[in-house]
Image: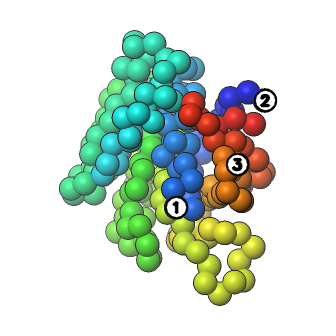
């Protein structure tokens, strides 16, 4: 039962999360996995991750390795932020992961403009770079869904070339279910990240 290792291979992921179950933590966990392998990470969000949480997840990395994590604020012009991510990922060596946390509205429909912008990001960055988009999912009010959280804009995101993953809390406590395209993983959320 060790720390979980994410093996992304250049696929692009839209992660829909149930509110406050560890979506940002999952992004930071993937970031440390990439940095440990020698890759570089670009992180874009309107809010920087909680400093304590960041410290817990990055505590096992050396200071030199931590320098491979580049954060930017996307609170202003979203299209301009995407352009900067494209330029940066194409000019910095060994970028393997781009994380956009809270990249769209927290509820309701995801605007076509945002979807077009992230599709452009996917098209104009190198294939070996994994793009991870983290957003709040919605709750199915009809009761027809088999899951607690439903990915918003699922069809549009798949058309834009993103796998759709879901992160849910099946019951109170540290257990989480991560549903990817191919499998359902039962993980445990701890201070240092996800364990299996």
Number of residues whose C-alpha sits closer than 10 Å to that of mark 1, classed few (under 14), some (14–19) or many (20 or more): some
Provide residue 19's location: percent of width, then percent of height. Answer: 52, 61
The residue shown at (44%, 76%) is 109
The image quadrant that residue 37 belongs to is top right
The residue shown at (63%, 41%) is 189
Quadrant of the rendering where the C terminus is positioned: top right
Q: What's the CA distance linking mark 3 and mark 2? A: 13 Å
> Tag 3, which secondary structure?
strand
- Reading the image, the residue beneath label 2 is 1
- Reading the image, the residue beneath label 3 is 175
- Reading the image, the residue beneath label 1 is 19
86 to 63, vertically: above or below: below
The image quadrant that residue 71 belongs to is top left
The residue shown at (48%, 46%) is 24
> Tag 1, which secondary structure?
loop
> Tag 2, which secondary structure?
loop
Task: Let me know if residue 18 appears in the view.
Answer: yes
Number of residues whose C-alpha sits closer than 10 Å to that of mark 3, classed few (under 14), some (14–19) or many (20 or more): some
- Name the outermost residue toward the left: 76
């Amino acid at each position: 039962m060790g720390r979980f290792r994410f093996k992304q291979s250049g696929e692009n992921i839209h992660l829909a999360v149930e509110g406050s179950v560890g979506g940002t933590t999952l992004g930071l966990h993937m970031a440390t996995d990439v940095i440990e392998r020698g890759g570089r990470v670009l992180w874009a969000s309107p809010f920087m991750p909680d400093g304590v949480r960041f410290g817990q997840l990055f505590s096992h990395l050396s200071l030199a390795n931590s320098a491979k994590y580049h954060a930017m604020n996307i609170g202003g012009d979203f299209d301009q932020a995407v352009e900067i991510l494209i330029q940066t990922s194409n000019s910095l060596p060994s970028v393997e992961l781009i994380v956009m946390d809270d990249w769209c509205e927290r509820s309701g429909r995801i605007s076509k403009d945002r979807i077009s912008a992230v599709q452009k990001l996917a098209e104009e960055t190198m294939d070996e770079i994994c793009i991870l988009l983290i957003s709040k999912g919605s709750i199915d009010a009809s009761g027809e869904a088999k899951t607690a959280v439903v990915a918003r804009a699922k069809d549009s995101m798949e058309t834009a070339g993103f796998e759709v993953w879901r992160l849910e809390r099946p019951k109170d406590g540290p257990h989480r279910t991560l549903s990817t395209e191919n499998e359902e993983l039962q993980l445990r959320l701890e201070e240092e990240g996800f364990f299996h």
